[in-house]
Amino acid sequence: MVTDTLHAVDDAGIITDSLNDPEVFAALFDRYSTMLYRYISFRLGPEVAEDLVGETFLIAFRRRGSYDVSYREARPWLFGIATKLITRYRRAEVSRYRALERQDPVQAVDGPEEAITHDLTAEGSRPALLHALSLLPRGDRDVLLLVAWSDMTYEEAARALGIPVGTVKSRLNRARRKVRDGLGGVNPLKEDIDG
């Protein structure tokens, strides 16, 4: 739903306007639900993604009064909520990576994982990549997936996870090194992600 006010041009304006007209908040759902669905689906599987997207927006709606409107884009805030929800499912996530690693490569759900699969230099790298991801500490894995595969800046990932930018950079460096080591020193992406 689009409002006639000037505030609703950006996410902060939508959130502000939704305090008086709750239906306005639906614009954020329209804007970000597909991105969140793809991110959560990759992390936990499509079977829980829809529920967690809904839960993410329910939490965001309930907390909209405390949103810092100096941040014009709500994407990092929403991804931060989603990442915290994903943490609840950590054991299932690691089990999923390990199970996928043992399977033949299959067509992935449209989303970040499809792009990743296309970016892999060899389809056979997928099981090794999934195994390497399953071995990463949760914090390192969260940073890697937010920055490398959800196209967030270091600053956005830091805001999403509630950690300093320097921590994002060190976790990302460590995660990339561990994934590369897990793949026998081969970078699984066509482009150099350390650029």
Image (spheres, helix red, strand yellow):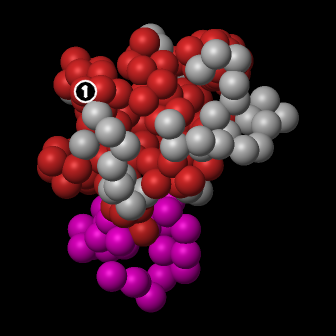
* Residue at (42, 36) in percent of width and height: 80
Q: Is residue 51 above or below residue 93?
A: below
Magenta span dominant secondary structure = helix
* Residue at (69, 29) in percent of width and height: 187
Q: Is residue 40 above or below residue 188?
A: below
Q: Is residue 24 magenta?
A: yes
**Residue that label 1 marks:** 99
190 or 38: nearer the viewer: 190
- Location of the C terminus by quadrant is top right
On the image, the x and y values in percent for residue 108 come to 36, 52
Q: Which residues are magenta?
A: 1-30
152 or 22: nearer the viewer: 152
- Neighbor class of circle 1 (other Cα within 10 Å; few <14, some 14-19, many 20+) is few
Residue 54 seen in the figure? no
* Residue at (28, 34) in percent of width and height: 103
On the image, the x and y values in percent for residue 35 come to 42, 58
On the image, the x and y values in percent for residue 30 come to 35, 71
Left or right of 99 in this view: 64: right
Q: Is residue 112 magenta?
A: no
Left or right of 123 in this view: 92: left
Total marks shown come to: 1
- Location of the N terminus by quadrant is bottom left
Q: Is residue 153 above or below residue 22?
A: above
**Residue flagged by tag 1: what amino acid is it?**
Ala
Query: At numbered mark 1, what does the secondary structure look like: helix, strand or loop?
Result: helix
68 or 90: nearer the viewer: 90
* Residue at (45, 48) in percent of width and height: 113
Residue 81 location, quadrant: top left
On the image, the x and y values in percent for residue 100 come to 30, 32
Residue 144 seen in the figure? yes
